[in-house]
Structure formats: structure tokens, C-alpha cells
Amino acid sequence: MTAELKKLGYDAVLLTDHENIRGWDSYNSHYRQEDDILVLCGLEYSTDDGDFLVILPDPDGFREFPFFMSTEKLIAL
């Protein structure tokens, strides 16, 4: 997967899903050994003010992250 992106000129990619990181889990299970580019984990997070794109430096620490909180609470984290 990442080799094809590298051929297209990409140096990095952000894998995201809405409200979960299943795409990241799938990537780790099947493609992680192919890392030809930087692969980051993220998600689209819903709040009362709309959706935010969150980049996760430590996807494993995310497992207990609460969903659907207010914008103020999200920013306070």
C-alpha cells in the first residue's frame, strides 16, 4: 500500500476513520512492515460545534478516549 503512494510522490499519509481507529488497526495488522512513507493515525471527532480532525501521536493511548464531548472539554484536554 505505502509503496504505491511513494511512487505517486507522497512522503506521508494520515489514516482516519470517523469516531474510531479501525483503519489504523487494519493497517498495523496487514501493511505495517511496508513502511516506505510516514504513516500517521488520526480520526474525525464529532463535537457540538462540528467535526475535528485529530492526529494521534500514540494510537494505543487513544483506546479510552471519550466520544461526543463538547468542544470546550475537547480543547481542555
Image (tube, helix red, strand yellow):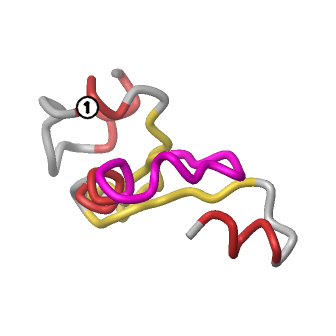
Could you say whether the residue bearing mark 1 is in a helix, strand or loop? Answer: helix
The answer to if 63 sits in the magenta stretch is: no
Whether 34 is among the magenta residues is yes
Location of the C terminus by quadrant is top left
Name the side, left or right, on which 3 lies relative to 62. Answer: right
Give me the residue at 49% from left, 29% from top: 57
Mark 1 crowd level (few <14, some 14–19, many ≥20, 10 Å Cα): few
Residue under the image location 32 percent in, 62 percent down: 23
Q: Which residue is mark 1?
A: 62
- Looking at the rendered structure, the kind of residue marked 1 is Phe
Instruction: Name which residue lies at 22% across and 55% down.
Output: 20
Q: How many marks?
A: 1
Q: Which of 47 and 58 lies nearest the eye of the viewer?
A: 58
67 left or right, relative to 18: left
Residue found 46% across the figure and 48% down from its top: 32
Q: Among all residues in the image, which is located at the extreme front?
A: 33
**Front one among 40 and 28:** 28
Image quadrant occupied by the N terminus: bottom right
Q: Position of residue 37 (x, y in %)?
A: 71, 51
Q: Which residues are magenta?
A: 27-40
Q: Camera-side residue: 30 or 42?
A: 30
Q: Is residue 49 above or below residue 5?
A: above
